[in-house]
Image (cartoon, helix red, strand yellow):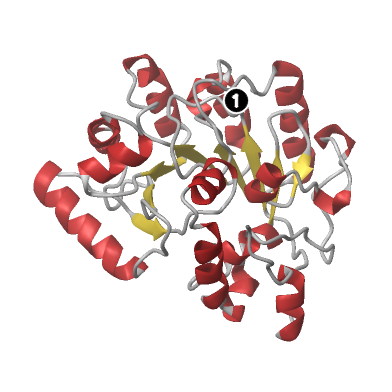
Amino acid sequence: MQLSVEPFNLTLAKHDLALRREQTRTLQINLGLICNQACRHCHLSAGPGRTEIMRPATIDAVVAYAERSSFEAIDITGGAPELNPHIESIVERLTPLAPRLMFRSNLSALNDPKKNRLREQLKSSRAVIIASFPSLNAAQTNSQRGDGIFQAGIEALGKLNALGYGHEGSGLELNLISNPTGAFLPPSQAETEKRFREVLKRKWGIVFNNLFNLANVPLGRFRQWLIEKDTFNAYIEKLISAFNPCAVEGLMCRTLVSVSWNGYLFDCDFNLSRGLYMGGRKTHVSEMPGPPESGLPIAAADHCYTCTAGAGFT
């Protein structure tokens, strides 16, 4: 039996807070749910068996939206965005449309020799690469993400370093995302970054710019895993007990709009997973004249406690 959770907005109200938009500065684009991995923690339940992918007509609509909206940043994600057959064209078209282009990778997809040209293109675009690398322990990583994934990640990081990524002064930013391998909250980000930096350099000669240590969101495959292991209630209680009202101001949903693989708009990637449309209605990207207006309310549910636990998601 699942726990009866106090509505997130009610918790905010008790702290005299409300979740509303500020200026929307980032466009996040989900290119599909197809992935070469089926990670246990995936909030989108992405994997090799999924078929959802952004098609050319939707890509055109998203590019047109970016052209008329003047976003400060564009964030390309998936699934594994590398597996969209139009990925090179997408990167090329989006590069001139925002000062900052971000590309999220699980590393193993980017490690494929067929992606040599994509890696070079990301370098030419000076895209910020945000790479998922959950643990320094190979066994833990492989148990969460699949056999051989840890080594593929190490190889991909080495290739990115060889291109100049992660090196001080190169202007090629390589950031890592670490997350727990189970139903618990992450340790100190500063301590985790220090340990990753020392171990990756010493063992493999790998360097990076920043590490972000994030909690797993109880959605998708991870939510189902929690329920199967009868740990869902305990995990939600951990998130609620770690609620930090100071984290609300910097939440990414306040300055981001997320577009799904089929072109519909959400306040964030987590709401996309939950099916909570931006503004409570199914709005296609082609209908939007520009960025969402400041002051609009943001859809919320129990998964939002993840983003306000401890240091939160920013």
Q: From this viewpoint, which residue is outermost toward the left?
A: 202
- Total labels: the figure holds 1
Question: Which image quadrant is residue 117 in?
Answer: top left
63 left or right of 37? right
Question: Residue at image x 84%, y 62%?
Answer: 296
132 and 1: which one is in front?
A: 1
Q: Is residue 314 visible?
A: no
Residue 125 or residue 256, whichever sits in front: 256
Residue wearing tag 1? 90
Q: Tell me, yes or no, if residue 63 can be seen here.
A: yes
Quadrant in the picture for the N terminus? bottom right
**Percent from the top left, x then y, of residue 57?**
76, 19
Residue 16: which quarter of the image? bottom right
Q: How far across and how far down the image is residue 258, in percent?
A: 69, 44
Q: Give the left or right position of residue 36, taking residue 209 as reference.
A: right
Element marked by disc 1:
helix
Q: Position of residue 79 (x, y in %)?
A: 54, 32
State the image coordinates of residue 294 (x, y, percent, origin top left).
Answer: 81, 63
Q: Amino acid at mark 1?
A: Ile
Q: Is residue 152 above or below residue 288?
A: above
Work out whether 194 lies above or below 130.
below
Q: Residues within 10 Å of mark 1 (few under 14, many from 20)?
A: some
For residue 54, side relative to residue 84 (left or right)? right
Name the quarter where the C terminus is drawn. Answer: bottom right
| Front residue (pair 128, 136) | 136
Residue drawn at x 62%, y 59% as measured from the top left:
252
